[in-house]
Image: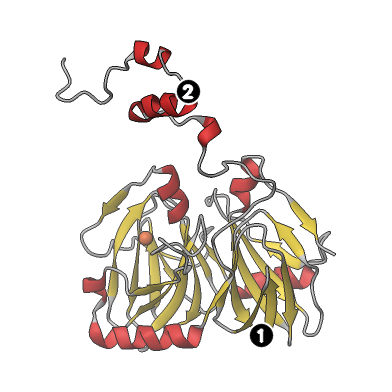
Amino acid sequence: MTPDTEVSPKPDIDALARSHDLDDLRARLDPLDFMAGWNKHEPSLWKEPRTDYKPMVWRWAAAKAGLDAAGRLIDAEQAERRNLFMVNPIEGNHYATLRTLVSAYQMLLPGEKARTHRHSPNALRLVLDVADNCYTIVDGVRIDMEPGDVLLTPGMSWHGHGNEGSAPCYWIDYLDVPLVQLLEPMFLDLWEGLQPAADNTRDSPYVFTMASMQAQLAQASPDTYGRTRILLDAPSMPTTALFMEKLIGGQNGQLLRSTENQIFTVVSGAGESRVGAERLSWSRGDVFVAPGWQAVQHHPAEDAMLFCVSDLPVHEKLGFHRMRVEA
Ligand SMILES: [Fe+2]
């Protein structure tokens, strides 16, 4: 078979051999799509991790006002998902919250359904405010949402949401879409409407209830870095580690630097955190982020609980993870 177009011109080997100086050689290499390493515009390696992503905080109060306004202006069917992505304000970025992760506030009005779909990215959500009869259907199993739930919809599991209750329900989504976009194994399938539920349970490996997480936290002792936190047992989520951490009012944590990207959500309490050169204040429902290698230290003003979504397993599996305590 003959290709329609030639991808690369035939190199003129003799012309390359006749190059009389480096500029001349470069001029002959450029059209062949070779870049001479000695002419690199930018270094490709550096001494320690660096990132354009910024430490940021997004306010729940603003997100709720925005979602409530959107609730008047667009229905869930039209929107596909009525959500507000937390976009890190760096040049050229229109989507990602951090390099590998994206997060969004989402709302469903009474009577609405968010139709079922499935995709290779892994997703999970933390339920913020829900009254009654709001649910996710994962692979044909209905899981009713309750405040504080962490609900998993692993890659390629069918998932949709419904609200048959009396009040809007709000949650926060976390997905590894930016990582999948980077590696490019993106797949998406759409279901016609909402998948019917063959079963209804809250006894599922895909839901962690607030009561169970609090009970586990009450038994937890501080780790080697002084953090009292539990790792949610979620083997279905290969790219993310999920932690619930308990902070005691007035007790500052250690200043920790890790290669992982971390999204923190304030489940309860208030305080501020140092992330890199920034000081981010937070209260319930707010989301703040620590890009990789930015030192993080929490300063809770009162007892608080933080939910952390991290890409730590990716760093660990690839052998890239490093962590240290800063003075
Ligand atoms: Fe989805």
Horizontal side of 81 relative to 136 (left or right) equals left
Image quadrant where one finds the C terminus:
bottom right
Res. 262 image quadrant: bottom right
The CB of the residue at mark 2 lies under 8 Å from ligand 1:
no
How many labels, in total?
2
The image position of residue 131, as x and y in percent, is: 44, 86
Q: Is residue 89 above or below residue 286?
A: above
Res. 80 image quadrant: bottom left
Q: First in sequence, mark 2 or 1: give its number.
A: 2
Quick check: marks 2 and 1 in contact, CB under 8 Å? no
Helix, strand or loop for disc 2? loop
The residue sitting at 28% across, 78% down in the picture is 112
The kind of residue tagged 2 is: Asp
Q: Nearer the viewer, residue 200 or 273?
A: 273
Horizontal side of 207 relative to 157 (left or right) equals right
Q: Dot 1, how many residues are within 10 Å of its Cα: few (below 14), some (14-19), or many (20+)?
A: many
Horizontal side of 209 relative to 154 (left or right) equals right
The image position of residue 181, as x and y in percent, is: 40, 49
Q: Is residue 87 visible?
A: yes
The residue sitting at 69% across, 49% down in the picture is 48
Q: Nearer the viewer, residue 265 or 47?
A: 47
The kind of residue tagged 1 is: Gly
- Disc assigned to residue 245: none
Task: Report how far apart the C-alphas of labels 2 and 1 lie in the structure.
Answer: 67 Å
The image position of residue 3, as x and y in percent, is: 17, 21
The residue sitting at 48% across, 88% down in the picture is 61
Image quadrant where one finds the N terminus:
top left
Q: Is residue 63 above or below residue 206?
A: below
Q: Which residue is mark 2?
A: 21
- Disc assigned to residue 269: 1
The residue sitting at 80% across, 85% down in the picture is 250
- Depth-wise, is mark 2 or mark 1 nearer the camera? 2
